[in-house]
Amino acid sequence: MAENTEEVKRPQFPTGRVKRIVKLDKDINKVTSDALLMVSRSTELFLQFLAEKSAEVAMEKKRKIVKLDHIRIAVKRHQPTRDFLLDSLPVPTHLSGKPPVEKTRPTPAADKSLPPGTRRIDSFFAKSANEAPVQINEN
């Protein structure tokens, strides 16, 4: 007799941060653990999909490194992703008509002025002092 050995997969993203990001929406007061799990897992699946499609584009172009242009092409090829994400991707310098900029550290986003009513979520993506570094095990 076979037992049901379904394993519950833990989310890869820190649930505390995901919860704080979700609660940035003023209309959301509480987030259930089930909803939090679904948002985290959906985000993981979306990023995996985007990474795979971007890697396919890089391989088509005979490149070993995925670059912003590869991500843009992958986004353009997938209608649902294109509809919400394409406007958020930075325009490559060779398409914007601007001369290439030297590779330096980008200016902190906090230095830029924001339109009224806009909130930043940069602090959610910064590592906290008590957080352990991410380790990747390659087999």
Image (spheres, rainbow, N blue to C red):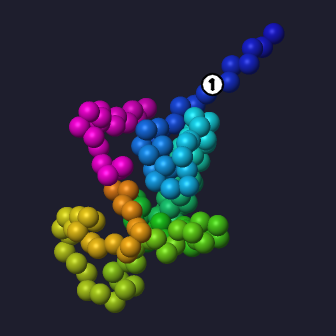
Residue 68 appears in which quarter of the rendering?
Answer: bottom left
Relative horizontal placement of residue 103, taking residue 89 as reference (left or right): left
Label 1 Cα neighbours within 10 Å, binned few <14 / some 14-19 / many ≥20: few
Residue under the point 65% across and 70% down:
79
Residue under the point 53% across and 31% down:
10
Q: Where the N terminus falls, by quadrant?
A: top right
Asked if residue 73 shows in the view, the reply is no
Q: Where residue 132 sits in the image (x, y, percent)?
A: 29, 33
Badge 1 element: loop
Q: Is residue 127 above or below residue 61?
A: above
Front residue of 18 and 103: 18
Q: In this view, does 114 lie above or below 97?
A: above
Q: Where residue 116 sits in the image (x, y, percent)?
A: 38, 73
Front residue of 48 and 89: 89
Asked if residue 72 shows in the view, the reply is yes
Q: Where residue 34 sits in the image (x, y, percent)?
A: 62, 36
Residue under the point 43% across and 38% down:
16
Magenta stretch? 123-139
